[in-house]
Amino acid sequence: MAGHLLKVSSLATAVFASSGFYLYNRQLNLNDLSVVRFGRAAATTVVISLDYMTAFKHVEYDTEEYWALRSKVHRRSAERLRDLCCANRGTFIKVGQHLGALDFLLPEEYTSTLKVLHSRAPQSSMEEIQQVIREDLGKELSELFVSFEEEPQGAASLAQVHKAVLHDGRTVAIKVQHPKVQRQSSKDIAMIEVMLKTVHWLFPNFAFMWLVEEAKKNMPLELDFLNEGHNAEKVANMLAHFSFLKVPMIHWDLSTKRILTMEFVEGGQINDKDYMKKHSINVNEISENLGKMYSEMIFVHGFVHCDPHPGNVLVRKCPQSKKTEIALLDHGLYQVLQPALRLNYCRLWQALIKGDMSGVERYSLRLGAGDLYPLFACVVTSRSWTAVNAGISSVPVTRSEDVEIQTNAAQYLPQISELLNRVPRPMLLLLKTNDLLRGIETTLQTRASSSSFINMSRCCIRAMARHKRSKANSRTRQLQITLTESLNLGRLTMYELFLWVSSSPLGHWLTALVAFLH
């Protein structure tokens, strides 16, 4: 303990000397100064580290008092981290939002506290927005738009969106990057890296350096709005066969690296059950279509939209056809899965659905989990080890199971940290995406529905067949693979029909009749 305290004391002294610690809590408008931002980040790191080191000195491990105190320390540390993100804004809020989405990977105290960052994103002034538009498009607002709403439709960590009307009468959404984010992002990532290295130095079991690696790789892509526009067009073409999917059309003549102008799409957030009820939108249909869409992206194409939080997934009735649609927004963050990883992930899910434990172990090992494969299976599915052993498609999700998973997330944090450092980097965004989708399903009360597993299985069968056909060296072999694929898809359709009949009034009547005759 003395050694730990000496480390922290040395660190604190360096912070005081180099960054002007006296600025930390003073109400000064110096947020653009790197020394202020770093001082704030370093001070928060020191305070959180000291809290974890000293709080448990007089408490016996694994007692009721220990776990209650641990929860309190988690909570106040999460609040300090949230306050740091709100103060430093930009990249800090983006990373905090990422952590807040990891419901089944981090302690509940952290995820519930950091979730509020989605509604605490900074807002640029109208003068700043006009300046960015003037610099990038070379014209004044009045030259580009008939009207431009000054109040943003939404503000996020990197940008905000305004509604406007073009001179030809079309309504558009204009996403404008916060002017200082581009300049500060690389420095912010460096600060976060220093924070995490410091915590790892003090607590060797805490190894969340993957967070920095992901930020270094993804932040430049997310800050390039032209890249986002290309992603939107690619996914719209890739999933064009889904009539329920709406991806806003891009206006390239009014788009730059810092400005993205697109078709304006209205709708309610996908977790807004009151909106769906008001507009007669079927919750089960929405959940099933969301599952179809993501299964296709992950298993068949390996091109995955990795930020499906409710603000980026809207539901609506199409004004023309009156059919229910899902509008997918914010295409800045996509994960490309290499074929080997995609197919192993595909095989892993097939094993998980069937309860094939030898397959679960085999494909978890191929994905880098090593001896932590049981934990990996639980993390991938957001299910308990008991459910994984039984086959996740046959065991319903319960509230007690969710509580067990979140409790284990706190208890096994070092092992989870090690696991996340082991697996291939693309798996990290997939796990985040899984957690966001599970969160939506939990709100809609459609988690672990049979239709979602059927759709996943269908995509897995198609993906494996496509891969085998690409490797086949004869037309006969290709035909054989296609026939096997059709047979397996047919079996799934028959099973789906059986489930539908079983749950229908006719099914209930037949069940009662058989019971009566028996």
Image: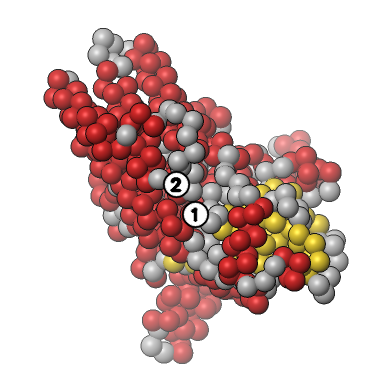
| Quadrant including the N terminus | top left
Is there CB contact under 8 Å for labels 1 and 2?
yes
> Which residue lies most toward the left here?
3
Q: Position of residue 236 (x, y in %)?
A: 63, 71
* Mark 1 Cα-neighbour bin, 10 Å: few <14, some 14–19, many ≥20: few
Residue sitting at x 76%, y 55% = 149
Tag 1: residue type? Lys
Placement of 175 over or under 115, stated as above or below: below
| Quadrant including the C terminus | top right
Q: Earlier in the sequence, mark 1 or mark 2?
A: 2
In this image, 317 relative to 200: left or right?
right
Residue sitting at x 40%, y 83% = 472
Residue sitting at x 84%, y 70% = 169
Q: 273 and 348: which one is in front?
A: 273
Give the residue number, with chain letter if any, for mark 2: 32
Give the residue number, with chain letter if any, for mark 1: 180
> Which residue lies most toward the bottom here?
475
Placement of 513 over or under 183, stated as above or below: above
| Numbered disc total | 2
Tag 2: residue type? Asp
Element at badge 2?
Answer: loop
In this image, 464 relative to 165: left or right?
left
Q: Can residue 354 be seen? A: no
Q: Position of residue 451 (x, y in %)?
A: 63, 52
Element at badge 1?
Answer: loop
